[in-house]
Amino acid sequence: MFSSEKNYTYASKETMGKLPIPPITPSNQHMVSQIESLVDKILAAKKTNHAADTTTWEKEINQLVYQLYELTDEEIAIVENGSI
């Protein structure tokens, strides 16, 4: 299950293994490519400066992931607020 410590939530391997992962399809390939590009930017920035502020890119990734999973506003609020 999930455990919380100092504003971080950790999940067990078993729990994470049960999460559905949306398949990459022609209709969502552009979102997947955007996520990959943003991850590359974050990694490059962190390689140059481990303290680099990448929160803008991280927020963009979050929004794309919400779209991939077709989350509702209510579901997004749950994810962002960390509580049900």
Image (spheres, helix red, strand yellow):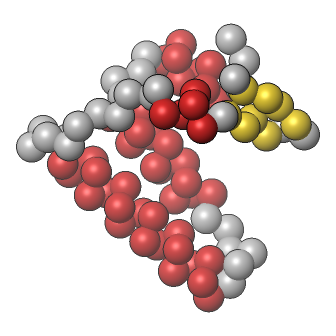
Q: Which residue appears farthest toward the bottom when viewing the image?
A: 48
Task: Judge whether residue 6 can be spotted in this image.
Answer: yes
> Which is more toward the observer, 25 or 17?
17
Q: Which residue appears farthest toward the right when viewing the image?
A: 6
Give the tally of numbered discs: 0
Compared across the picture, whether 54 is left or right of 75 comes to right
Q: Quadrant of residue 33?
A: bottom left
The percent position of residue 13, horizontal first and vertical second, equals 60, 38
Taking the spot 41% from the left edge, 39% from the top edge, the residue there is: 65
> Which is more toward the observer, 79 or 20?
20
> Which is more toward the observer, 79 or 11?
11
Task: Judge whether residue 81 can be spotted in this image.
Answer: no
Q: Which residue appears farthest toward the left when viewing the image?
A: 26
| Picture layout, residue 43 above or below residue 11 | below
The percent position of residue 2, horizontal first and vertical second, equals 72, 26
Which image quarter is the N terminus in?
top right
| Picture layout, residue 59 above or below residue 23 | below
Compared across the picture, whether 71 is left or right of 24 comes to right
The percent position of residue 46, horizontal first and vertical second, equals 62, 77
Q: Quadrant of residue 63?
A: top left
Q: Quadrant of residue 6?
A: top right
| Picture layout, residue 23 above or below residue 56 | above
Taking the spot 20% from the left edge, 43% from the top edge, the residue there is: 24
Which image quarter is the C terminus in?
top right
Compared across the picture, whether 80 is left or right of 44 comes to right
The percent position of residue 40, horizontal first and vertical second, equals 43, 71
Taking the spot 53% from the left edge, 13% from the top edge, the residue there is: 74
